[in-house]
Amino acid sequence: MSMVAAKSPPSGGDPPFHSSWQARIIALLVLVYAVYALGQLDFSFDRFVKGLDSGAHFLARMFPPSYKNWDQLLTGFIESMEIAVLATFFGVLISLPIAVLGARNLMPGWATWPARLIVTLCRAFNPVITAIIFIKAVGFGALAGVLALIVASIGFVGKLFMEAIEEISMKQIEAVRATGAPFMSVVIYSVLPQVMGRLVGFCSYQLDSNLRNSTMVGIVGAGGIGGVLFAAFQRFEYDFVLAILITIIAVVLAGELASNHVKRIFRV
């Protein structure tokens, strides 16, 4: 029985990170522009050092954390959780039909481009900007935060779910269609079973993302713990600010653990 010797890598030849002259020119242009941008933004080393000193003084005022206003913290946290759950639920609920309409392997072109346009528009703006628009429309409070995060959820879940549908096997779809089943039966019995695992993963990640984003939209007046955080900054209660930040970190970590547990249950 003959043994085939493993081939050793050649000693001479192309380097492991070989690049063309076009790539080198692009890298050089990016470097030149980065240096130019530093000059335009009035960046200086002295300013950076002063910023470190101011930052150290600010951090010193945050310790030890104070939970004296724990009732405000609890109220803001509960409201942020409600905003995140409602935004994720309705965002996913709206994203499902949009994603089905936008899948090129299921729908004709006249139906896919409007659905894709909706997803693109929802992804075009940061949730904070969307929250400001809804605050002008419906006023301050949690409703503006929920609406802003619904838009963000449609942009994220809709795009990923649309791509997941386009990657499924068409054999199962053709088999269901051959029985004469209507379109909704095709979606329920051949499309959803193939993408359900990925959909659960998308939803769990979006819930985690909405929980974080609820802090940002709250800072501009869209409810949640972000409003409590902004008010603490306004009152110069930096020890309470640290308590809020610790709570946010703990909640995000707990959400990550819960998300991983859900993924293991559905074997995502």
Image: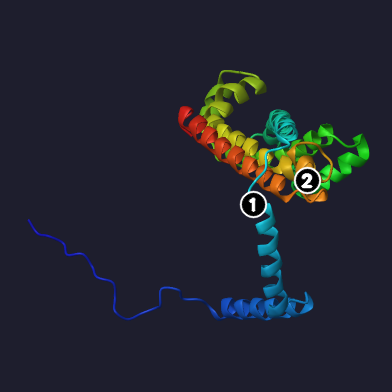
Amino acid at pointer 2: Ala
Q: Which of 111 and 129 is in front in this view?
A: 129
Q: In the displayed image of the protein, which residue is found farthest to the left?
A: 1
> Mark 2: few, some, or many residues within 10 Å (few <14, many ≥20)?
some
Task: Let me know if residue 2 appears in the view.
Answer: yes
In this rendering, would 148 be left or right of 168?
Answer: right
Q: Which of marks 2 and 1 is in front?
A: 1
Give residue 246's quadrant in the image: top right
> Mark 1: few, some, or many residues within 10 Å (few <14, many ≥20)?
some
- Residue at numbered disc 1: 63
Disc sitting over residue 176 in the figure: none
Q: Nearer the viewer, residue 166 or 59?
A: 59
The location of residue 42, given as percent across then percent down, is 78, 77
Give residue 116's quadrant in the image: top right
Amino acid at pointer 1: Phe
Q: Nearer the viewer, residue 53 or 248?
A: 53
* Dot 1: element: loop
Q: Earlier in the sequence, mark 2 or mark 1?
A: 1
The location of residue 67, given as percent across then percent down, is 68, 39
The location of residue 147, given as percent across then percent down, is 80, 35
Give the colour scheme shown. Answer: rainbow
As displayed, is residue 113 above or below residue 51? above
- Residue at numbered disc 2: 232
In this rendering, would 227 be left or right of 20?
Answer: right
